[in-house]
Amino acid sequence: MDDMDVFAAMGISGFGKSMQKKKLDPSRFDKNKRSEVAAPIKDNIAGPSLLPPENKGEEDDDSDDNGPSPPPPPRASTKDVDSEPEYDPDDMEDHEADSEISQFPTTHELILKDHTKVVSALALDPSGARIASGSHDYDCKLWDFGGMDMRCKPFKSWEPAGSYHIHDMKYSNDGQKFLVISGTLQAKLYDRDGEEQATFIKGDPYIRDMKNTSGHVGELSACAWHPKNPQLFITSSADSTIRIWDVENKRKQKTVIVVKSKERGARTKVLSCAYSPDGGMIGGVCLDGALHMWNTSSNFVRPNLSIEGAHVKGTETGSMVFSVDGRTVLTRGGDDTVKLWDLRAFKKPLSTRSELPTLYPNTNAIFSPDDKYVVTGAGAIIKGGSGRLLFMRKDNFEIEKTLEVSATPVKVFWHSKINQIVTGLSNGQICVLYSPQTSLNGAKLLLNKGPPRKVTIEDMSDALAAPAILTPHALPMFRDGDGIARGSKRKREKDRMDPRKSRRPELPVTGPGKGGRVGASATQHVVQNLVRDTTRDEDVSGLRYLYAASQTTNSASASRSIA
């Protein structure tokens, strides 16, 4: 006999009051489900995006080789119904379609609306619970999935640098702090709740040698945290340097990497920087099109690996990122290309994908968590048109999937722990893509909470009532009650039972008096209090005695003077 049978035999059904569990609607995710993109749309997106109509047939052939499209033909559905009845045949055409669904959590979406201009910076903390976003509207915002309701609003918003655009934001590896990089000369460090911890120093603009300045003298462009040491981070700037900083020392950088260009003047703008996964290498891409690599164990006099013309000179490369194994580097150029580089053969790129419209210089490209795919955004072809998210195979940059979004995607982030894709759009929206089957927490937390509770009259009365000040350590003469903080509900019920406290106050009498109460006009009590004659209320017996005593004293003194 198990424990529950023993309890039942003894007449014990349980311990304490059982709480009623909230039942969630199984179809709660359906309202956020994306409409599937038809196959002809994918053909227009895959490959070159500006082809004339006569080349559309060639694109149809290429798209069939790239990967399966979401809606399968009807003839394949009857076959799969017999073989795998537990799955929906429209979604499970074959094993490759199954792997696609598991790879790309894009069936549902959640839109976060609060920015008014393009979202130019985006970061997620390591746990996937919070989003930090920056925009060209000069604001930084913090979003918390666990604390948000269905309105989807941030819990903190502020301007870190006045009227300067936000260029980059990065969370530290422990998730307790993050960096904000704006168009100013100084990086700012914030804690998890958005409270400023440090503002790092700017350099002297009149010093020519960049190694002798204590900070940057040109606007900042990007930042990156050390993957192993949470005390170190790097920043890149338009002053042709990458600087290594210590979190504890905001007065001077730890090391300066001066980037020398082959152009006239020997200076160039460093557009992006990154650490390798083991922290042994620092990379940077420049405005002159060069891509440089330095070993962190070197003296940083010259780069260990360098390639000129990695991207077109004069175009702004939006991002560079190392793969998980640290052998390849992915760059997203302002020349409408995405390139994959192998550090062991650093002469030419392994793969190149061109004709990806780049409307904003902050547009980035990332690796998928399993390091098999590359994700980037492609801008809208016409003004006000929709943008596209491209999922490409890492080995040959074949387009595996194309996702249409409402505006041009600028920043893309694929979080490995919650398996959700967050992208910042040019219209100020943040689009969170997820799958109810493969994603964890994140955007799903909002719908797991159920519908919001209706506001009652008690809630409104508590909100309008004066806040209670609790002083448990006050002296007995100043203590309210017996020093025990009771709940407002119990106090309200007790007051309701008291006939004096619950009695409705009488309304002021207007017009003639009645019931023993004297009527008064609306302004009579004001006029009475302006000039109040209080002599009628004084006791004059004491004054009469003092007057008589003073008269007796005066008469006595007068008689002595006469004598």
Image: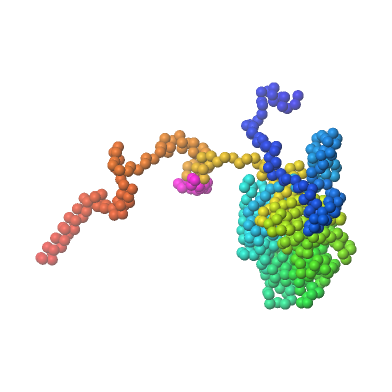
- Vertical placement of residue 372 versus 304, above or below: above
Residue 192 seen in the current view: no
- Residue 50 horizontal/vertical position (percent): 78, 58
Residue 277 falls in image quadrant: bottom right
- Vertical placement of residue 507 versus 212, above or below: above
The number of numbered badges drawn on the structure is 0
- Residue 60 horizontal/vertical position (percent): 83, 51
Q: Which residue is located at x 62 percent, y 40 percent?
A: 451
Q: In front: 408, or 515? A: 408
Residue 326 seen in the current view: yes
Secondary structure character of the magenta stretch overall:
loop
In the rendered image, residue 469 lying in the magenta stretch gets the answer: yes
Q: In front: 148, or 138? A: 138
Q: Seen in the image, is 153 located left or right of residue 543?
A: right
In the rendered image, residue 189 lying in the magenta stretch gets the answer: no
Q: Which residue is located at x 84 percent, y 39 percent?
A: 76
Q: Seen in the image, is 154 located left or right of residue 124?
A: left
Q: Seen in the image, is 487 located left or right of residue 191?
A: left
- Residue 119 horizontal/vertical position (percent): 68, 58
Query: Which residue occupies the extreme right position in the image?
Result: 345
Picture quarter with the N terminus: top right
Residue 435 falls in image quadrant: top right
Residue range in magenta is 464-479
Q: Seen in the image, is 131 located left or right of residue 503?
A: right
- Residue 503 horizontal/vertical position (percent): 41, 37
Picture quarter with the C terminus: bottom left
Query: Which residue occupies the extreme left position in the image?
Result: 563
Q: Which residue is located at x 80 percent, y 52 percent?
A: 43
